[in-house]
Amino acid sequence: TAHDVSGHCRFFIPEMDDGSRRRLDLDTALRRALEREEFTLHYQPQVGLASGRVVGAEALLRWQRPGHGQIAPNHFIALLEDSGLIGPVGEWVLHEACRAARRWLDAGLPPLRIAVNVSARQFRDHDIRGLVRRALDATGLEPQRLELELTESAVLRDADKVIRTMHELNDDGLSHALDDFGTGYSSLSYLQRLPVARIKIDRSFVSHITSNPGDAAIARAVVGMAHSLGLSVIAEGVETEGQLGFLNGIGCEEIQGYYFSRPLPENEFVALLREGRCI
Ligand code: C2E
Ligand code: CA
Ligand code: CA
Ligand code: CA
């Protein structure tokens, strides 16, 4: 049995090594990904319900990892944050999103809002205001075209500092959207303090909006509350005509989701814009 135990140990230890090695490999691969230009952005249309037309695009990060295909951000954003790589990668995202919006304008496409996700870490540890200024200056994009998406939890982590920075960014002319709304713990009075133009109703409510009266009630209340505070509402994760109809009925201004389009590579997104497709 002593033999069994040692056999077990021999088996167990290399397996642990594999796990940490994989993480290390991923970390090394991520470090190289930027210089090797393996990151790309996909764009998901945001559609205005009054016009039925595309009014904005959310930029979503993708990693084309050689030998691994395309990797979604949920698999590596946390690692980027832990390693501090979110700084340079976030800077690349912001520049690339602004460059893309600029290309679309130069191609004569109707002006859109471009929404970029920023994490808590980016807001706290990096000079986000300087970063935004440089991206806008480099591309000549008007600040009014740019919106930053922040989650409730990102804001809550260091509320006073984040809110101050959000005000400064508003002074520079850009706007903010509160992402994943409803999944955090914001109180009404707190929401009132946040300088956001828009609230994004989280997909977890939207998914069951036509079948779960509780989720329907929450969505209705969020829209009512947002409007009474002068904020606009966009629903994310809209997949069905039923969900669209319900959201339209409660006065939600915009929708985003597979019902209209998945996030697309830039060429496909531009093709969709050219078609002038409506809801
Ligand atoms: P998010 O900001 O909540 O983005 C929405 C996510 O829902 C995206 O996943 C999008 O592809 C997906 N989605 C959109 N419509 C639908 C739908 O109708 N049904 C379903 N089931 N899903 C839908 P994605 O692209 O995998 O991004 C995941 C998260 O990664 C994002 O969540 C965001 O928090 C983060 N992320 C993405 N790009 C960046 C970035 O450049 N910087 C930072 N800091 N975070 C990013
Ligand atoms: Ca988002
Ligand atoms: Ca979201
Ligand atoms: Ca979400």
Image (cartoon, grey):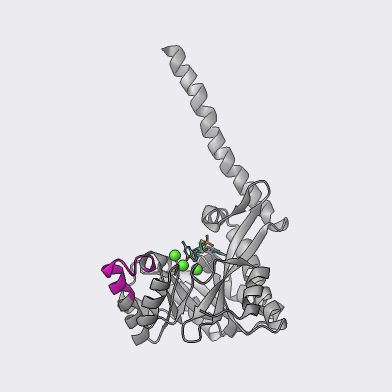
The residue sitting at 63% across, 85% down in the picture is 110
**Is any part of residue 196 visible from this angle?**
no
- Whether residue 28 appears in magenta in the rendering, the answer is no
Q: Is residue 143 visible?
A: yes
**Splitting the image into 4 quarters, where does residue 60 fall?**
bottom right
11 versus 23 height, above or below: above
Residue occupying image coordinates x 51% and y 72%: 260
- Number of callouts: 0
Q: Does the magenta portion include 214? A: yes
Q: Quadrant of the N terminus?
A: top left
Residue 83 at x, y = what percent?
57, 53
Q: Is residue 34 left or right of residue 113?
A: right
Could you tell me residue 71's position as x and y percent?
59, 53
Above or below 105: residue 65: above
Task: Please report the residue visible at 54 percent of the width from the left and 80 percent of the height from the top.
Answer: 278
**Which of 14 and 112 lies nearest the eye of the viewer?**
112
Give the percent coordinates (x, y) of residue 55: 55, 81
Magenta stretch? 206-219
Q: Position of residue 136 (x, y in %)?
A: 65, 79
Residue drawn 33% across and 69% down?
Answer: 210
